[in-house]
Amino acid sequence: MKILFATPELAPWVKTGGLGEVAGSLPAALRALGLDVRVLVPAYPALLQNFPDAEEIAQPRGLGGLLPAPVLRQALAPDGTPLLLLDYPHYFNRPGSPYLGPEGRDWLDNHLRFGLLSRVAAWLGSEASTLAWQPDIVHCNDWQTGLAASYLHYLPGQRAKSLFTLHNLAFQGLFDHASLFELGLPDKAWRIEGVEYYGYLSFLKAGLQHADAINTVSQTYANEIQTDAEGMGMAGLLRHRAERLSGILNGIDTRIWNPAADHHLYRSYSARRLDGKDTNKAELQAQLGLAQREDLPLLGVVSRLTEQKGMDLLLEAAPQLLKLPAQLAVLGTGSHALEVAWAALARKHRGQCAVTLGFDEALAHRIEAGADIFVMPSRFEPCGLNQLYSLRYGTPPVVRATGGLADTVIDAADEKHGNGFVFGPATAEALLQALQRATKAWHDPGRWRKLQKQGMARDSSWAAAARQYVELYQRL
């Protein structure tokens, strides 16, 4: 089968979260199973810099009279995955975030930028394409490529099937009515059975409405988003299309996230040689200015500092957590108010709480390896990747029972299968109780070592997920 994987992000060059990681790993796993997968992604500066010799292979036509015409360039990723780089400098030659301008607000022409990405994805999956290679399935990802399913739906003639993968329902790609005409969609698309959503044009609804199949990144999240409480306004549509909706849990790149071969770590280790974690903990404490205490549990966080991620709950629980006593190492960036509050907490508890605002890939790896316990109190979490990293690094996670967290973390109360600690209500009190259970277990070395090894034994590679995607493609 020939699969076009359309994405607005691609790790390691352009990523803001889990979607970039998935796009950087899943296509290679699918190719390993014999599928012909090619990745369509905007030619952002980072990609053009890393692939300066990417050759022009097509100039898609009939896309709204853009002058000059967009150019498709072809490159080969280091893992052998063919990349199709959509080169249109006016839209994509911009520094920083793929979605936000320098002042931190959405680019005003995001509908045109990702409308073009969607149109080119549909063009490649239609009879209009001038390439010899044509996909059997156009695999769209999140709102930025959701409109591809609508373009394919309204195109005459033969077309590829479409799959829409929902990575986060919270981001819906909403634009005003005038966008319908700017994007070249027919008048009949402006209806409840089309792309119209409470007076707006929604890229995300377009994908949910018109894709031949829909999936999201965990089975629990697929169930949650069909409820009015968790469906963010889309629950009715998702229930209507429930027969087309499934959940496939994400994997992780086990070559990059491997404590036995991670070049970011101070010392490598494995489930058979766990003493290396002690070295990583001591060095991490030194790097962050924390007291080098072996007798205190060190809790790690790598997260967006937002309410979705429950970082306000952890902030509320932190004073009691630090009194246990325990140490806390936080890495992330997010809402201004939470950044200010977390920085103030670190100043008040120097030597016991360290907060690094921003993102640092090496430090993220070192926190996963050096922390004793990882904390993910998300209010909702479609899949989550950090809990998978934590399990692989022998750092039992404390998570809320939601989405992919519920599908991957088994509470330590299950002595045979437990690999972490799970709590229910999205409250600081429930979180603190789970943290207290975790720190108490940490003080029992025999029990803790068993918990670590059970987590490290979990297969979090892309192999199982890739096989499920192959089955989904075959059904399409």
Image (cartoon, grey):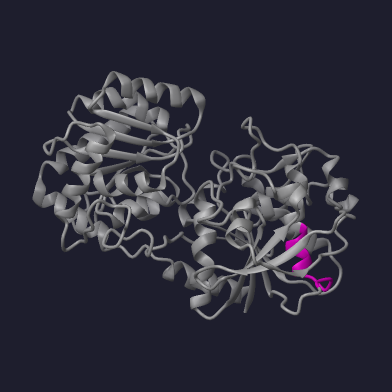
Residue ID at (36%, 58%) = 257
In magenta, the rendered stretch is 119-129
Residue ID at (22%, 49%) = 412
Q: Is residue 452 above or below residue 5?
A: above
The quarter of the displayed image where residue 10 is located: bottom right
Q: Is residue 210 visible?
A: no
Q: Viewed as shown, does residue 337 lie left or right of 95?
A: left
Residue ID at (28%, 54%) = 393
Q: At which x and y percent is residue 377?
A: 38, 38
Q: Is residue 255 above or below residue 449?
A: below
Q: At which x and y percent is residue 205?
A: 70, 49
Q: Relative to the observer, which residue lies in front, 130 or 102?
A: 102
Q: Viewed as shown, does residue 48 lie left or right of 469?
A: right
**Count of all numbered marks drawn on residues in the image:** 0
Residue 122 belongs to magenta span = yes
The quarter of the displayed image where residue 351 is located: top left
Q: Relative to the observer, which residue lies in front, 263 or 115?
A: 263
Q: Relative to the observer, which residue lies in front, 164 or 411?
A: 164
Q: At which x and y percent is residue 188?
A: 88, 52
Q: At which x and y percent is residue 460?
A: 37, 62
Q: Quadrant of the N terminus?
A: bottom right
Q: Viewed as shown, does residue 241 lie left or right of 227?
A: right
Q: Is residue 229 visible?
A: yes
Q: Viewed as shown, does residue 205 lie left or right of 81?
A: right
